[in-house]
Image (cartoon, helix red, strand yellow):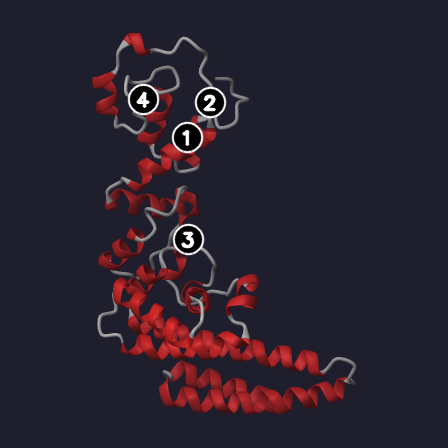
């Protein structure tokens, strides 16, 4: 292979986090193939099955997509201890999470992530409660029409006895049927609330790993965000063509009552931090 060939660099493979067994597996098949055309094999099997008559006569052609696919197959078969080491090397910050929690979280990613370098963005929501919402998805998932069904979902999940994937999925689908809405009307805001992004592990699996308390806190935060988006859109649309003074007045009329409701809500169910945030938001809306 020429050094100019795309992907034909051992150093590049190492930096990209390719599994050594995957690279060995792929390179061995560039000029040879077993009789049954097997693809994914450990080195011991390759050595055992290698025979000279199966060496290809045609020139080998480097296929980066095939290497990436083979790396994914080896990556998803790694023991969890090895997968965890690769996650750390890729930059995943586990914070103060327990070993059992880390294993459970990574277990939901191993069949999904094709390149280990993608792990930090794919699973970071497991290890921090501070993340932004994807704006494009929020415009759809946090639409005003979704707030009431999503609030009902929060109530349903608060009462699910067995907070594991199957009961959670059953509860969500049952609610969708009861409300006569499509499942995605509940799934989209739930996913965005829990992860901040559109793509990730199975929604029901990731909620089970996060646990009831963290899921409900994130749902509450998302419900507040949905109210803020609605209020902001209303102020913006209502203020079109108005003077700045009138826009400020409209903003106060909408936002002050909104934050009063949020203040009462969080004093009823929120923790101490949420109460302080609600009070601060109320004061800002009042004096601005």
Label 2 and label 3: CA atoms lie apart by: 29 Å
> Which residue is more in the foreground, 32 or 83?
32
Q: Residue at x 46, y 77 (%)?
A: 223
Between disc 1 and disc 2, whose residue precedes? 2
Judging by the rendered image, the residue that carries numbered circle 1 is 67
Q: Is residue 32 above or below residue 196?
A: above
Q: Residue at x 43, y 37 (%)?
A: 16
Whether residue 288 is visible: no
Residue 160, how many percent across, how many down? 26, 74
Mark 3 or mark 2, which is nearer the start of the sequence?
2
- The 10 Å Cα crowd at callout 3, few under 14, some 14 to 19, many 20 or more, is many
Q: Which residue is mark 4?
A: 37
Q: Determine whether 156 is above or below 182 in the image.
A: below
Residue shown at 72% from the left, 85% from the top? 247
Q: Who comes first in sequence, dot 4 or dot 3?
A: 4
Front of the two marks 2 and 4: 4
Q: Which residue is mark 2?
A: 62
Q: Residue 242: x percent and y percent?
A: 77, 84
The quadrant in which residue 139 appears is bottom right
Label drawn at residue 122: 3
In this rendering, would 214 be left or right of 48?
A: right
Q: Is residue 209 above or below residue 217?
A: above
How far apart marks 4 and 3 lie (CA) works out to: 33 Å
Q: Nearer the viewer, mark 1 or mark 4?
A: 4
Front disc: 4 or 3:
4
Marks 1 and 3 sit apart, C-alpha to C-alpha, by 21 Å
| Mark identifier at residue 184 | none
């Amino acid at each position: 292979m020429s050094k100019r060939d795309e992907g034909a660099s051992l150093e590049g493979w190492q930096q990209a986090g390719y599994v050594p067994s995957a690279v060995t597996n792929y390179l061995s098949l560039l000029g040879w193939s077993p009789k049954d055309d097997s693809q994914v094999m450990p080195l011991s099997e390759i050595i055992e099955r290698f025979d000279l008559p199966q060496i290809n006569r045609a020139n080998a052609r480097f296929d980066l997509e095939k290497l990436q696919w083979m790396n994914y197959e080896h990556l998803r078969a790694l023991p969890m201890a090895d997968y965890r080491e690769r996650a750390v090397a890729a930059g995943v910050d586990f914070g103060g999470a327990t070993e059992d929690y880390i294993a459970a979280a990574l277990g939901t990613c191993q069949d999904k992530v094709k390149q280990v370098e993608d792990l930090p963005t794919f699973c970071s929501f497991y290890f921090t409660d501070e993340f932004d919402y994807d704006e494009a998805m929020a415009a759809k998932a946090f639409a005003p029409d979704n707030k009431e069904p999503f609030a009902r979902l929060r109530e349903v999940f608060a009462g699910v006895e067995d907070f594991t994937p199957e009961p959670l999925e059953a509860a969500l689908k049952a609610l969708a049927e009861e409300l006569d809405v499509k499942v995605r009307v509940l799934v989209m805001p739930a996913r965005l609330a829990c992860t901040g992004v559109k793509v990730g592990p199975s929604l029901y699996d990731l909620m089970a790993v996060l646990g009831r308390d963290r899921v409900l806190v994130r749902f509450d935060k998302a419900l507040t965000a949905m109210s803020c988006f609605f209020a902001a859109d209303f102020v913006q649309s209502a203020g079109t063509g108005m003077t700045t003074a009138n826009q400020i007045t409209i903003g106060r009329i909408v936002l002050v009552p909104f934050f009063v409701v949020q203040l009462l809500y969080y004093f009823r169910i929120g923790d101490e931090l949420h109460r302080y945030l609600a009070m601060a938001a109320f004061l800002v809306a009042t004096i601005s």
